Image: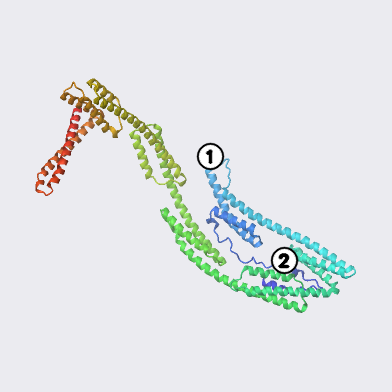
Amino acid sequence: MAPEELAAFDGNNDEEKTETPNSEIIQEEETHQPDLEDEEAPGFAEIDFGQLGKEEIIQILEKELSALRNDGISAAVFKQLDELVREVKPVLDQFKRTELDEARTRYIEENGNEEGFAYKSHPETQKIEELCRQLREEKSKYYKQLDRAKEDNFNIKTGLLQRLRELVEEEENKETDDAKMKAGWEGFKKIQEEWKAAGNINSPHNGTLWATYNALVDRYFSIRNIYFELKELDRKRNAELKQELCEKIEGIADSIDPEKLSREALADASQLFEEYKHVGPAPREEQEALWQRFKEAMDRIYDARRAQSGEIKRQAAEVYEAKSKIYEAIVPFTSFTSGSINDWNAKTKELLAYQNEWVAIKGPLPKDEGKDLSKKFWSALKTFFHNKGEFFRQLESKREINLKAKTELCEEAESILSQGEDNAQNTQRIIELQKRWKGIGQVPEKFKDSIFVRFKTACDAYFDKKRSKNQAVEKEFEQNLEQKQALCARIEELAASDVESTLEQLNSFKEEWTAIGFVPKKDLQAIQKRYIAAVNAYVSAIGKLSSKEKELVSLESEVEVVKGGESERGLYRKENDIRKKITQLESNIAVWQNNIQFFAKSKTSDKLKSEFEKKIASAEAQLSDLKHQLLIIQEAI
């Protein structure tokens, strides 16, 4: 209740007055209630919805719609929601225009013209539009229900007036007796209660209804003078009720903090005033005193409210100063530029910290200056994020180029794979493609995995095919090794048996050995040594040959083995390596033999001499073996 209402309401609603009350005053008393929600509440104008994403806007709208449905509704709530929908609408329109333009552009790029183009908004955009529509529907439903309620109240009060009129006429015409007067009084009190419980009605009828109601009440009490004592009892009861209301309102006035008046306290005070208005008259000698007592407490509450308005202005100035500093701190961000993603992300993190600090500062702002400051703040944020978006658009353009380059590498790798040849040249080409791939930068995020999988699949398929072929060859080599090992075992067995050894059988062994293919490289020397040893043992068992002939046959066999496993060029290279080793061993043996001559002068000469003699013996054994190998290679060449 505003202070001016207290002045208009003097508390003397004495039903004994015969004159008809002024209809305008009665209408004001009935319809004007303290608008406790007129207090300036934080609105949505400070939020720059243009900087918010669709999901954030949806969350705000859903939150407001849920609160509307769960927490109850009022005209003040819908005033805030109107502001919310009004702020969201241009952003929603921009979303729809942007999506429409993008969809039309894609359609024209894909089809060459706009013919047959059809567009459907993004689901999130449709969600925002649907939420705005639901908010408007809730508002429309609220006011329709309010209008219906007022219409219903009008019908109720019209019916009550008819009942009251019939009651008054009956009181005027009937013979008075205690039973009938008591029944009439009860009916009158019931009508009073129902009238009080009925809500507001449309203002054009309010004054007339109140005037008619008060006139009928006056008539009723006029014809009940014989029951004046009953009225006096009622007045005393009203006085008691008003005293209780005075005590309650004084309790609120005494308990409030003048610097922090709560909306709940104002709401309670307004409710008490409404109750006071509807309490009937008190005895004349108490009526004015009670009213002045009640009004004095209400004045104290509204004095605190006016004082709080000054405090709110002071707080608004402090909030404005704090937010101005934040705005000045973010101004340099509007001109920030860098070629590094990390730099942009770091700056974004700093800016969002300022934004959180801005939002965390609660409290009112001066109306005009605050609106201008908020506009500049959100505009600065928008400028920064626009520049950041431009940087990433250019970065995305470079990534498109990289995507094209990597796509070409994929096509080239797939072309090599389709040739079906896994020769050394193609293998080297695949390796070169892999090196070039590593040198190309990033591609757009949505193609990052798919393009890599495509390239890797082609390369893996090539090497898997090559590996499969090598495995087949290795398997064949292993089988050859088993055959040669079996052949060596047979030769060794015959050489050790009593069966006569012959050159014809030896030649048969040689032919069988030559017919068997290659063995794994790691087993080549071992199987050759075993074969040569087996052949030599077999040759030694041939009784018809002299020692010289046996030596020649053995040497010839070794030459055939060595010559069969190496190319001519490889034999020359091997010969050269063996000569170098022979030269080095001969040099080492000469040095060690020379050193032995000096050991006699040393206290540990025996030990040192023994060690060098072992080295010399080992070197001479190696030298003998190398000379034998050199002889075989020379024969093969």
Quadrant including the N terminus: bottom right
Between 274 and 406, the residue placed more toward the observer is: 274
Question: Which mark is in front, 1 or 2?
Answer: 2
First-in-chain label (1 vs 2): 2
Q: Amino acid at mark 1?
A: Asn
Hey, which residue is sitting farthest front in the picture?
Answer: 498
Residue 186 position within the rendered picture, expressed as x and y whole percent measured from the top left: 82, 67
Hey, which residue is sitting farthest bottom in the picture?
Answer: 285
Asked if 529 appears above or below 391 in the picture, the reply is: above
Q: Which residue is mark 1?
A: 111
Q: Could you tell whether 130 is left or right of 25 in the image?
A: left
Tell me if residue 12 can be seen.
no
Residue 564 position within the rendered picture, expressed as x and y whole percent measured from the top left: 25, 28
Q: How many marks?
A: 2
Q: Crowding at label 2, few (<14), some or many (≥20) Cα neighbours within 10 Å?
A: some
Q: Could you tell whether 144 is left or right of 219 in the image?
A: left
Q: CA distance from mark 1 to mark 2?
A: 64 Å
Label for residue 271? none
What secondary structure is found at the residue carrying circle 1?
helix
Between 239 and 274, the residue placed more toward the observer is: 239
Q: Quadrant of residue 634?
A: top left
Q: Which residue is mark 2?
A: 31
Q: Residue at x 72, y 71 (%)?
A: 276
Q: Quadrant of residue 172?
A: bottom right
Asked if 125 appears above or below 518 in the picture, the reply is: below
Q: Could you tell whether 413 is left or right of 85 in the image?
A: left
Q: Residue at x 82, y 71 (%)?
A: 218
Tell me if residue 356 can be seen.
yes
What secondary structure is found at the residue carrying circle 2?
helix
Q: Could you tell whether 121 is left or right of 282 in the image?
A: left
Q: Crowding at label 1, few (<14), some or many (≥20) Cα neighbours within 10 Å?
A: few
Q: Amino acid at mark 2?
A: Thr
